[in-house]
Amino acid sequence: MVIGLTKVASHKHCIVCGKTVDETETFCDQVCESKYRSAQRRQTLFFLVFVGLLILMLIVPVILKAPQV
């Protein structure tokens, strides 16, 4: 027995706020798209800083242990 099921038009949801958008869209408006791009830039920056610090943590001890001539 099936109760209360209705057909809903094919759709997606905005990846930032969750509002319903057309199947071909990813964001509901420019504000959400701007927030998403900003968050991606920030995430990329944090990743690059992390990789830079990791490289420094691996290289600096090797340089400091190098025998002095």
Image (cartoon, helix red, strand yellow):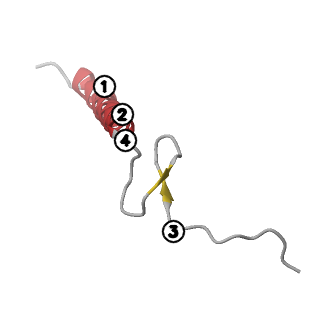
Looking at the rendered image, the disc whose residue lies closer to the viewer, 2 or 1, is 2
**Residue that numbered label 1 is attached to:** 61
Q: Residue at x 36, y 62 (%)?
A: 24
The residue carrying pointer 4 sits among few (fewer than 14), some (14 to 19) or many (20 or more) residues within 10 Å by Cα, namely: few
Q: Residue at x 37, y 41 (%)?
A: 29
The quadrant of the picture occupied by the C terminus is top left
- Judge left or right: residue 9 versus residue 30: right
How far apart marks 4 and 1 lie (CA) works out to: 49 Å
- Residue 24 vertical placement versus 1 (above, below): above
Closest to the observer: 18 or 54?
18
**Circle 1 — which element?**
helix
Secondary structure of residue under mark 4: loop
| Cα separation between marks 1 and 3 | 57 Å
Name the quarter where the N terminus is drawn.
Answer: bottom right
- Quadrant of res 46: top left
Report which residue position mark 3 lands on: 10
- Amino acid type indicated by mark 2: Val
Q: What residue lies at 84% left-to-right and 77% top-to-bottom?
A: 2
Label 2 sits on residue: 31
28 or 63: which is nearer to us?
28
Q: From mark 2 to mark 3, how far is it between C-alphas? A: 24 Å
Q: State the separation of the CA atoms marked 2 and 1.
A: 46 Å
